[in-house]
Each structure stands twice: as structure tokens, then as C-alpha cells.
Image (cartoon, rainbow, N blue to C red):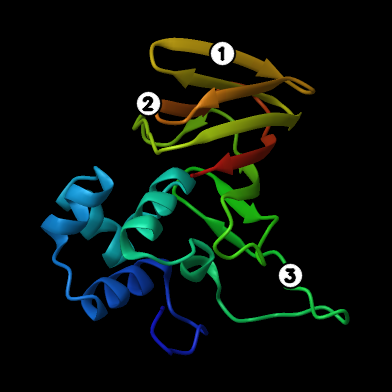
Amino acid sequence: MPPKKKAKNISTGQRIHDLRKDKDMDLETLANETGLAVDTLEKIESGENMPSVGSLLQIARALEVDSAFFLEKEVKTTKKGLAKAYSERTSHYAYTTLSPGARHKHMKAFKIEIPPKQEHDGVSYQHEGEEFVYVLSGKVEVTVGEHVNKLEEGGSLHFNSGLRHLLKNPGEDAALLLVVVYTP
């Protein structure tokens, strides 16, 4: 269970740090549970880097919370009481959760925007499960293992996210994607 702290004005990295400390977990243990390097986790916790969706899912699993806990800035609801989507920006792309009320569910949906000529620092990711990418606009390259998949508007890819993968926008325009991640 996440700590009872106000969500307002707490960064994703600070939430990860606080929850890790509340669970009496050191960085080495979290690194072993996620496959992320200790220095990568330190940069995430300090706010220097924002984790990718895949890394965030791995961290959430290791800390036994829903990944949405790390992204919420404050709880917002519509007239019908449904949680609104919220956005977060990494160094190289922005993502908005499309399923903020799906706590403890196996499937999460995100809208991801990648600016022109951007990739996530050339670092690939992997996490247990499957991923589905649908290109709403623009062009992307999705490298899965050693295979590069070139997708344009209307193109899609479904792959085993346990394989190393990387998103890149080689185009001159921003790319907008619908990404669905399934974790067992």
C-alpha cells in the first residue's frame, strides 16, 4: 500500500524514493528487482531523468504499487467521478495515461508523443509482458531485439516486451502513438 502522502507537487522520482524508503529497500535491491542500473535509479529519484513507461512499470512492480501512483500530481475527477488522464514528460517524449483508474490491472494504455528526431537516449527497455503500438500520426521506428520496425500513420506492432525495445522518431514531424502495455 502506498504511503498516505498528498499527491500535490511531489515528483515521480521523489515518489519512487519515498516509497522505496518506506519499504526499507536499498537501491541495490531495487536495481536487482528491475534490471535498471543503480546510477539510473539515482538519476530517476533525483529528478534528473524521467523513467520510460517500461521502466516505470518495472519499478512499480518491484515496489508493489500501481504505476499510476508515481504519475498522479493530484487527484482530479470528472462530473461522473471518473479519474482524468494525466500527462508526464520525459527527457525525450511525453506520455499521457489513458487508463488512470486501472489500478492493479494488467493492461495500461498510454498516448505517447515523440518530438521530431528524438529517441529515449538510445537506451532500450524490456519488461515482462506484451506491448501494442499504434501510430496515430507521424513516423516511428520500434526496434525489438535487433529488428527495426518502421511504422507510419495507421501502422501497428504487437510484440513481446520481454525483448529489448526502443522507440525512435526519425521524422521531421512529431509522432503520436497509442501504446497498450500488458504485464502479467
**Going by the picture, which residue comes out furthest to the top?**
147
Q: Is residue 6 above or below residue 135?
A: below
Question: Which residue is at a point 72% across and 29% down the rendered structure image?
Answer: 135
Q: Residues within 10 Å of mark 1 (few under 14, many from 20)?
A: few
Between 115 and 113, the one nearer to me in the picture: 113
The first of marks 2 and 1 along the sequence is: 1
- Kind of residue sitting beneath label 3: Lys
Left or right relative to 94: residue 38? left
Give the SS element for disc 1.
strand
Numbered tag placed on residue 164 in the rendering: 2
Question: Which residue is at a point 35% across and 66% down the rendered structure image?
Answer: 13
**Going by the picture, which residue comes out furthest to the right?**
79
Q: x, y percentage for residue 117? A: 54, 28
Q: x, y percentage for residue 178? A: 70, 39
Numbered tag placed on residue 149 in the rendering: 1
Left or right relative to 151: residue 92? left
- Kind of residue sitting beneath label 1: Asn
Query: Marks 3/2: CA distance?
Result: 31 Å
Numbered tag placed on residue 9 in the rendering: none
Q: x, y percentage for residue 146? A: 39, 11
Q: x, y percentage for residue 176? A: 70, 37
Query: Marks 1/3: CA distance?
Result: 32 Å
Give the image quarter of residue 15. Answer: bottom left
Left or right relative to 170: residue 63? left
Query: Marks 2/1: CA distance?
Result: 13 Å
Between 53 and 112, the one nearer to me in the picture: 53
Quarter of the picture containing the N terminus is bottom left
Numbered tag placed on residue 84 in the rendering: 3
